[in-house]
Amino acid sequence: MANTRRSRLAIIFEKRFAPFFWTQFLSAFTDNAFKQALVLMITFRATMSEAETGQLIATASGLFILPYFLFSPIAGQISDKYEKAGIMRRVKFLEIVIMLLAALGFVLAGAGFGWADTYLIGILFLMGTQSTFFGPVKYSIIPQHLREDELMEGTALVESGTFVAILTGTIVGGILILQSVYFAGGALIVFSVAGWLASRKIPFAAPANPDIQIRWNWLSEYGNLYRITKQNNSVFLSIIGISWFWFLGAMVMAQLPNFVKLFVHGDESLYIMFLSLFTLSIAAGAVLTDLLSDTSIELGMVPFGLAGLSLFSLDIGLINYSQLPDDIVTAATALGGSANLVIYRAMLDVCGMGIASSFFIVPLYALLQHRTALETRSQVIAANNVAGALFMLGSAVIVSVLYAREISTPQLFIVLAALNVGTSLYLLASHPEFILRFLIWLLGLTRYKVRYVGRARIPGEGACLLVANPMGWLDWPLITAASERPVRFVHETSKPNSLGSAVLTKWFGAILMADDGSAEASTAAATSIRRALEAGEVVCVFSGSKNAGSATGPLLHEHLAQVLEDATVLGVPIALHELSGQGQTNRGPSGTTTSLRRHVEVQVGEGQPNLACSSELVMTAQQLLANS
């Protein structure tokens, strides 16, 4: 197992991934170095008033985000139409040109030209435009260079690299501008050239949709982007979740300076320490998600991450900061271990928020890439970028309103925790697959050791009929975890009109069948199964004893064979069983029992494209179980 993990982590050194990784890393690094250098130069110009400085910084932030609204629909289409590595090289070359213009602006500012500030803010708009065209390519190219079982790791590495680049770029940008405006300009050119050189090594990535006609009316394209994202509910909800992350991140990053200064009584060095802890915790959490995912897109981490965010946000808001002395706290004091315990508790909360953020952002990004059609993937990423920008603007508006009502920063964290609870309930209620996967992930970490054999045999797209033996309440979570796609289960019930049945149908997409044994009930269920398969979905029926959990009777399989007689559907047999002699409850000589971790195996058989509608698939599933 250890060797497998080391080989997986080695993709960061492989030619198919490393050039892309360093290209996107240097892109984020250069962006943030330039923004920080510009903000500090504007802030510390003695000739400007506080109001003028604030207005310029606010304008700069708005101009950087504005291109996302103007050009994202077009950027997504271009990324789908043309070869992606070539797009990256052109965008990175454009960055060199922009940094040359930026360097000229810093020279003019150093020479005392007052309008240089306005000029550089205009350059920030160009950088935002460059980032807008880079964003859709950044995530849509990953699935073209990595295997499906590497997608989680690749996404985790990109996320961790991005936040390390944001942090280091921000710090380096500040250092550069404090040295000299000329030095800052020259260094930014060097960074952009390095990014372009890295992009020249990115492997070829074939156009996803070369026949698409570019629609230049960006305003009308928003409707098209919305329709594309709504085609898959899990993709749409992933965009909501990812955008919520940027809402939270923007709020925390914006409030950290005031929080550290006014409540923790820290200086600039302690603020940098808190900022570093937050961003590096996101990066570390991204890597941790990969270590816990075991090559699959582990959606079970999403509820865990959302819960952690609320808990840590609530705790940092409930701390009694009045017990802190008025003495200024520095980073050296905190590192030396002589700071008040309240400060270390706040640091722990900030780290917890960062790690918890990664636990839901990384799986959602991986899901967004995996479940989006190749020909529209870049456009979906573009829609995600627009939504993220909207949520960040919404974050700023909400913070302004709350501060206008004289709310304190700790109270703001409590509000953040409450808002996160509401968003979590919406996401989990709208897509219960998160709950099923969380259940099996949690059980896999605590009570059960689950081994999957042949899970890649469940196709990544197209209609598929799964036939499995029932295993009580575990069968739904086990099969859900085995499939990278949502699974619709056939469930027999004596109360099809009850609240429980409505929940199964509405939340989990179950196909209900009355258990009265009538031919009408089985025919209706078989017809519903056919409609689901015609829509390209994955459906699971259970075969076995009527007293065994979720098993359906033979009458359904007979009617299913008739209804699907002329259909072309891939059938996949699955055997669920507990491994004998492993993880059983044993009784010792004294009569006491010891409960060991139970071992369960999910074995997926070979797909049978021509047997999905016949009794042979049921027999194959039963034989697979017998031979396990």
Image (cartoon, rainbow, N blue to C red):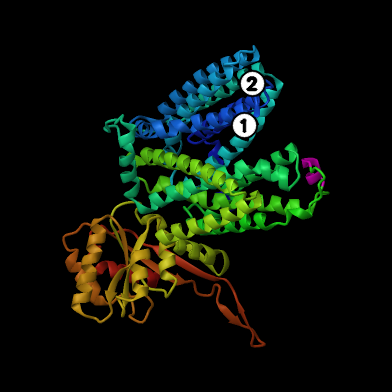
Residue situated in front as seen by the camera: 235 or 122: 122
Residue underneath mark 2: 184
Against 8, is 111 above or below? Answer: above
Q: Which mark is residue 169?
A: 1
Residue closest to the eye, 526 or 510: 510
Name the secondary structure under disc 2: helix
Crowd tier of the residue under label 2, counting other residues whose Cα lies within 10 Å: few below 14, some 14–19, many 20 or above: many
Q: Work out which quarter of the rendered image holds the C terminus and state it.
A: bottom left
Q: Quadrant of the N terminus?
A: bottom right
Q: What x and y, as percent, mark residue 260?
A: 71, 44
Q: Residue at x 56, y 36 (%)?
A: 13
Q: Is residue 388 above or below residue 446?
A: above
Q: Nearer the viewer, residue 25 or 566?
A: 25
Q: Position of residue 135 (x, y in %)?
A: 45, 35
Which class describes the residues within 10 Å of circle 1: few (<14), some (14-19), or many (20+)?
many
Asked if 296 appears above or below 469 in the picture, the reply is above
143 is within the stretch colored magenta: no
Q: Position of residue 173 (x, y in %)?
A: 64, 28
On screen, 491 above or below 105?
below
Q: Amino acid at mark 1?
A: Gly
Residue type indicated by callout 2: Ala
**Magenta residues?**
330-336
Q: Secondary structure at mark 1?
A: helix
Left or right of residue 107, residue 78 in this image: left
* Residue at the limit of the structure toward the front, as seen here: 405
